[in-house]
Image (tube, rainbow, N blue to C red):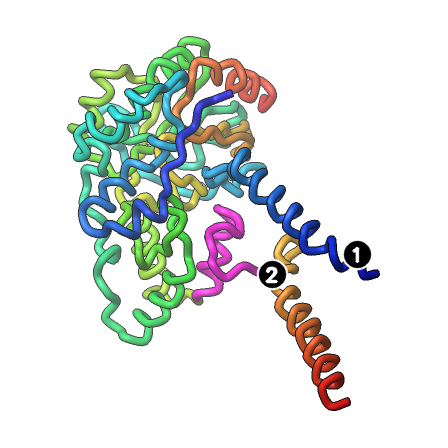
Amino acid sequence: MKRFALWAPLAIFALLFAVVASGLFRPAEKVVRSAMVGKPLPDFALPAMVPGKPGLSSASFRQGKPRLLNVFASWCIPCIAEAPQLMRLKAMGVPIDAIAIRDTAPAIAGFLRRNGDPYERIGSDRASQVQLALGSSGVPETFVIDGRGIVVKQIIGDIRPENVPEIVQAVKDAR
Amino acid sequence: MRVRFFIPLPLAGGARGGATSRLLAARTRHALLRPPPRAGGEVLAALLFGISPAVAQPVTPPAHYANVQLADPAKEASARALMETLRCLVCQGQSIADSDADMAADMRALVRERIERGEKPASIRDWLIARYGDYVTYDPPLSGLTWPLWLAPILLLGIGSWIARSSFRRRTR
């Protein structure tokens, strides 16, 4: 009993050290994942962002075919980085719609002119309210929505070339 | 494995205040959380200093209720109380009431608009938890994961009183 009491502080210290060290070497994920994955897309109807392209409502995600929902903005730098990947996905036949966060028509038109336009529809979310309803915590984010309007996958941050196959697979699986 | 940089976000948002914190908070909207692959110091430096900060901020003004109080003081007080217990999602160490981040402003507008419409603070909190998980609230609900938070103080109080009792007993002997 006395021997145990002698070693207990050292044992507690070792345990605490291990906990702290593991936190140092494997820091916690700093992204906030949406709790909407696996749930139906919330109802929304957003006005058109740019002339000549329709706005976006949740009804267009319930037409039997999976689609991508890209959350982006003209003022977002990683959105420029992911643009080529979105163009590639479009070329592969993946339909992509978008929500533009707190943006203006001229700024988005310029962004699409510079970086390509992979979108079928773009809704204007002027106060980020649909973004909040989606559980999205920044731009860019991309959601894979199945044909019944259920969110099946969330990609946080810019889509990298190595992410493209997993997205294509998710869209295929959502059919 | 992807290279990740961790900026002490609460420090970046809290200690400096004013315009700097707002710029930092705006750019942490994923921009710094996931830098390009094979990113070296120069990429981080470019992100921090090279790119014009104005580019990384929304081009539209914040919603009306982001920085404007509700007309009814009682409603504003209950909105304020709720905002102080909701976490800013981009600065992560601050409540949305304290944060200068654009997304926190959007969340304040959401809270005030719903309170104005007569919604209960608890239902707004539940709405946000359904979207962001328990992480979004500083007032975590009792669940399988959080029960030690609630139970530990009672347990420690019990142990403390037991130690106190036995040591007092020894002294009186």
Relative to B79, B70 lies left or right:
left
Up the image or down, B78 lies above or below A68; here it is below
Locate the N terminus of chain A by quadrant: bottom right
**SS class of the residue under badge 1?**
helix
Q: Which residue shows up at 81% across the image and 61% down it?
A: A2
When asked about the image quadrant of residue B55, the answer is top left
Q: Which residue shows up at 54% across the image and 59% down it?
A: B140
Q: Which residue shows up at 40% across the image and 28% down it?
A: B34
Name the amino acid, label 1: Phe
Residue B167 rendering spot, x and y as whole percentages:
71, 80
Up the image or down, B106 lies above or below B149; here it is above
When asked about the image quadrant of residue A106, the answer is top left
Q: In this view, which residue lies farthest toward the right?
A: A1
Specify the label residue A4 is tagged with: 1
Locate the C terminus of chain A by quadrant: top right
The answer to if B131 sits in the magenta stretch is yes
Q: Which residue is mark 2?
A: B149
- What segment carries the magenta color? B121-141
Q: Identify the chain of the residue marked 1, using the numbered disc in the image.
A: A
Q: Is residue A51 visible?
A: no
Relative to B122, B67 lies left or right:
left
The answer to if A106 sits in the magenta stretch is no
Name the amino acid, label 2: Leu
When asked about the image quadrant of residue B152, the answer is bottom right
Q: Nearer the viewer, residue A82 or B1?
A: B1
Q: Is residue A103 visible?
A: yes
